[in-house]
Image (cartoon, rainbow, N blue to C red):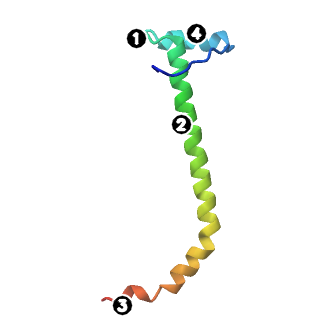
């Protein structure tokens, strides 16, 4: 995190969530800000992955007809070198 600009944000959490964090965090000793930062990075990566998967699926669906035509065009080529 060195050399990167930081921004302070106020976030409101339910007491139950903070209690759960405190209960599971005993051994690691990670401070709350670091925990939230890591969790946020992981969630953003997950959302970016889902977005990419959706875009790829849409691209595959958009090209499905062309792919079928191309496969049909080459269906007899597979046996030429045997």
Q: Earlier in the sequence, mark 1 or mark 4?
A: 4
Q: Residues within 10 Å of mark 3 (few under 14, many from 20)?
A: few
Asked if 55 appears above or below 40 in the picture, the reply is below
Q: Give the camera-side residue of 48 and 78.
A: 48
Q: Position of residue 39 (x, y in %)?
A: 53, 25
For label 4, the residue is: 19
The crowding category of the residue bearing disc 2, from other C-alpha atoms within 10 Å (few below 14, some 14 to 19, many at least 20), is: few
Between discs 2 and 4, the one toward the N terminus: 4
Which residue position is annotated with label 2? 45
Which one is closest to the eye, mark 4 or mark 3? 3
Vertical comparison of 62 with 65: above or below: above
The disc, 1 or 2, on the residue closer to the chain's N-terminal end is 1
Q: Mark 3 or mark 2: which comes first in sequence?
A: 2
Q: Work out whether residue 65 or residue 2 is closer to the camera in this orientation and state it.
A: 2
The CA span between labels 3 and 2 is 46 Å
> Mark 3 sits on what residue?
80
Helix, strand or loop at label 3? It is loop
Residue 27 bears which disc, if any?
1
For the residues labelled 1 and 4, the Cα–Cα distance comes to 15 Å
């Amino acid at each position: 995190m060195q050399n990167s600009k930081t921004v302070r944000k106020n976030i409101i959490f339910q007491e139950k969530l903070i209690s759960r964090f405190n209960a599971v965090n005993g051994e690691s000793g990670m401070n709350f800000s670091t925990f939230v930062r890591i969790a946020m990075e992981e969630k953003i990566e997950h959302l970016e992955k889902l977005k990419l998967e959706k875009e790829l699926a849409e691209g595959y669906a958009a090209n499905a007809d062309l792919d079928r035509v191309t496969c049909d065009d080459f269906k007899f080529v597979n046996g030429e070198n045997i």
